Amino acid sequence: MALSLLLSLYVLLGAAANENSPRTQKCETSIFTAPIVPGAEVLSIIAEEKRDIDTPAVPPSIPALSGLNFCEVKVYLTHPGANDKVLIQTWLPLSHDLWNGRFQATGGGAWTTGMLDIALAPPIVTGYAASSTDGGHPFDFFSTDWMLNEDKSVNWDLVYNFGTRSLADEVHVGKNVAEQFYGRKPDYSYWNGCSQGGRQGYALAQRYPGLLDGVLAAAPALKLTNVVLSGIWPIVAMNEAGTLISNCEFDWFASKALEQCDILDGGKDGTIGDPEDCVFDPFGLVGQKLTCSGREIKVTKAMADAVRRIHQGPTTPFGINYFPGLPFGTPSNVFLNVTIDTNGIRKLNDPAVLDVFPRTILLKDPNFDVSKVSASDYVALWVQASEEYGWSFNTDNPDLSAFRDTGAKLLTWHGITDPIIPYQNTVKYRQRVEREMGGSDAVDEFYRLFLAPGVQHCGLGPGAIPKDPLESLIDWVEKGEAPDTLAAETQDHEGYLVTRELCRYPRTPKYLGIGDINRASSWGCEGVDDDKVVQQEVDVERHLKDEL
Ligand SMILES: [Ca+2]
């Protein structure tokens, strides 16, 4: 009797469990069928249960993780006529109970379309079904060789994959694979990427509206051909100024700018709240002395001129500025590599990866010498890059109406002292969207931008870094709670916690004058004058061609 009662209870409880939670399939190849992907043909699917997997860190935003368990689904597809073979890798929490019901598509970085395992580990830890793609090319952050065929002609299909096509494929496949595994569609789908991955988020919003409910796109490499070439501008600027300036000297100028402008936001906290307010004149330091590697150096006019030109950003020989430079106070560690030897001889060291794109893809000239580029050569490179690759890479269409009309949300944050992608590049895009789509308030309904003072590229720097911007996006999408500020924190050099609420663009931070300067509660956000925000757009490309 007791046994039959137990059996009855077992059946009842089992039935109830089945009714309330759909059964997760076993993680094996046989349970998956080919997803339908517009414009592509699935070649194969392989599913395998993975246990106790470790993944490496990618500083500053991705930590090393270990002991991960998941169902890995590899889908290989091709685009008919392209002769490509693209991997889309999806990781799925092993049971329905471990899944948070959401899908997350992840982005790449530098010259990768996706980061595969590295990018998939953080979302699996927090319960997402998540995807990444290799775009059909080898994984290498710093090489663009894969964009060329063996005969050195451009592989336009891979250029297309990298720019936009593989991103949509990744979302189609990932959502479908999750649905097959869990027996229901994801409740919500998101994009999460920084830098190249940030640009990719905008590519999805601009070209494939309707695929995602929310896009988190940090420090986006919008106008990618411009961003890439802006990396060699400091070298051109030094050529034009007639002197090389060492990293040590540049950083001395940065410290002077910080000394002067830190207080403009009301608080001496080691960051400049709004560099637009910082009117810093490097020529005012001519004649002053500094010390680098034990050697005393006197600031010359040529040095001040080099610093001015670097901060001004790409400018034609006739003085027309066509891309933002690094704001004052930004470190030089990425784009400058000049040292001074014991004899006082200045030397431009190997520019490392800065010249990869112009050397291998644009000019296809292995002997290209970036140290010899003049301001007019540079304009020619700029126009060529934009004309040949802009259609795939630049992701700068300001019309987001189709994305807005689906109800989706776009959230971006950008470090103000980003030494790789000037934050003004993102601001300029946002201003173009405002002009196109009814002004700042109308755009804020679906697209919000937060600037992070003192933060570098995707993280690092002395400023407070957004704590969990994806959570803020989720609250906006799923609960209708639009973020007015973005919670951020960091630790100062003594390990003391620093908190901030990052201001929603175009507002800027202001210390309230009382209270702990390291606490968010001591800071507010203030508005800006209208004339500061809206500037008429100039057709820069046409202007540059006129000068050629
Ligand atoms: Ca400050």
Image: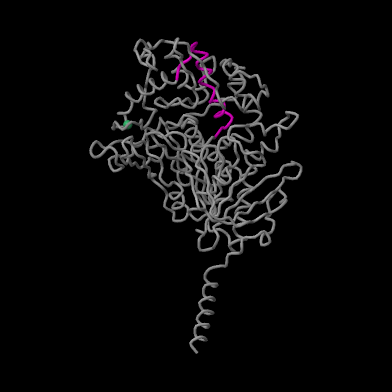
* Residue displayed at 72% across by 45% down: 79
* Residue displayed at 54% across by 79% down: 11
Magenta run includes residue 226: yes
Q: On screen, 293 above or below 80?
A: above
Q: Where residue 48 sits in the image (x, y, percent)? A: 63, 56
Q: Quadrant of the C terminus?
A: top right
Magenta run includes residue 491: no
Chief secondary structure of the magenta span? helix
Q: Where residue 234 sits in the image (x, y, percent)? A: 50, 20
Q: Where does the magenta region start and end?
A: 222-246
Q: On screen, 98 above or below 81?
A: below
Q: On screen, 530 above or below 321?
A: below
Coloring basis for residues: one colour
Res 145 quadrant in image: top right
Report the front residue among 16 and 47: 47
Q: Where residue 32 sits in the image (x, y, percent)? A: 67, 59
Quarter of image, ligand 1: top left
Residue reaching furthest to the left:
514
Q: Where residue 453 sits in the image (x, y, percent)? A: 38, 34
* Residue displayed at 48% across by 45% down: 64
Q: Quick check: 221 left or right of 481?
A: right
